[in-house]
Amino acid sequence: MGARSGHEEPEERPERYVKPSPGSSGSGGLPPQGDGGSGDGDPADDDGSSGTGARKQRSFWKELPLLVGIALVLALLIKTFLVQAFSIPSDSMMNTLQRGDRVLVDKLTPWFGSEPERGEVVVFHDPGGWLDDTQTPEPNVVQQFLSFIGLMPSSEEKDLIKRVIAVGGDTVSCKKGGKVMVNGKALDETSYIRPGSTPCDDKPFGPIRVPEGRIWVMGDNRDNSLDSRYHQELPYNGTVSNEDVVGRAVVVAWPLNRWSTLPVPDTFDQPGLKSAAVIGGTVPPGALAVAGALPIVLVRRRRLTRRRTDG
């Protein structure tokens, strides 16, 4: 069946407003709509909505200092325990890093006992005597604040950035016209040293035994890098203590057109590089003594056991 028309259902017709007679009370009709009708309710609604907006606005301004404080605390925690930005001040790491680049340094893993590995690019504090003649610019108040919370590289601390070539227990050397040797293995450095640079022709060195807990570092721009080679007159032959390492540079974050990661080159994963260091004597003498005495103890215990059994 089709839809019913309104003529078939008179009971659903809307009531018509009946104008009251002059003597009646008007109780049976709808309220007249005039100046005192719905218009009287609109200003009240407007006042209520505007009051709510004012309350919301005041609430936001009250919460704003709290939000700013939380953001600053988080930024400080991130800088202290997670990552920190550093600016590249020189050309010693070209072409891997260029002057003015901003790198992000991982500061989390050292808290869990991680130590620098061969091939990593690391930021470290001046061990002493490396940057004595370097003048640092005086930062303004804004720069100091942004550096403190980690949103801007620090311009006061004397930090350096180089590549780890050898770690504690390694023997490193390089002859003029040759390649850098680590534990008797030649490094293929063509993937990271600046084109036109030589491995060490400007400053041959070694062989040098890297003390435990220290690293030997070199810049990728070998002809323009005052690295471990140029500080061999200092204690520990120019090596850097692991405690002075801030962290590993993992990403070039700025400028955006130079965004890239900083992986470990494949040459540092070549077979025999790490095992050669162990064979060379990186195992502590005490461990070697225990390993040598263990078979003797076992043989002696077997003999005693046999005697007791025979007896």
Image (cartoon, rainbow, N blue to C red):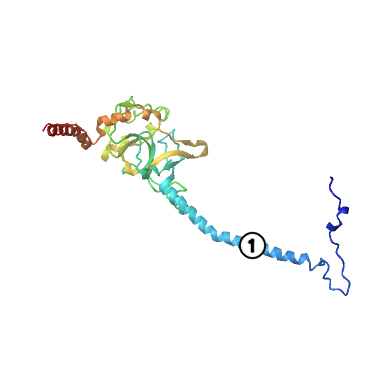
- Which residue occupies the foreground of this view, 87 or 292? 292
- Which residue occupies the foreground of this view, 167 or 220? 167
Up-down relation of residue 139 to residue 197 (above or below):
below
Label 1 sits on what residue type? Thr
Side of 185 relative to 103 (left or right) = left
Outermost residue toward the top in this view: 177
Q: Position of residue 261 (x, y in %)?
A: 46, 36
What is the crowding at mark 1: few (fewer than 14 residues within 10 Å), some, or many (at least 20)? few
Residue 221: name its quadrant: top left
Side of 16 relative to 263 (left or right) = right
Outermost residue toward the left in this view: 311
Residue 275: name its quadrant: top left
Which quarter of the rendering shows the C terminus? top left
Which quarter of the rendering shows the N terminus? top right
Q: Position of residue 138 (x, y in %)?
A: 42, 50
Picture residue at 73% right of the left edge, 65% below the top: 43
Q: Position of residue 220 (x, y in %)?
A: 39, 33
Q: Secondary structure at mark 1?
A: helix
Picture residue at 40% right of the left edge, 29% below the top: 266
Side of 257 relative to 218 (left or right) = right
Residue 172: name its quadrant: top left
Q: Position of residue 86 (x, y in %)?
A: 43, 43
Query: Does residue 82 show up?
Result: yes
Query: Does residue 233 show up?
Result: no
The residue identified by callout 1 is 52
Up-down relation of residue 96 to residue 140 (above or below):
above
Count of labels in the image: 1
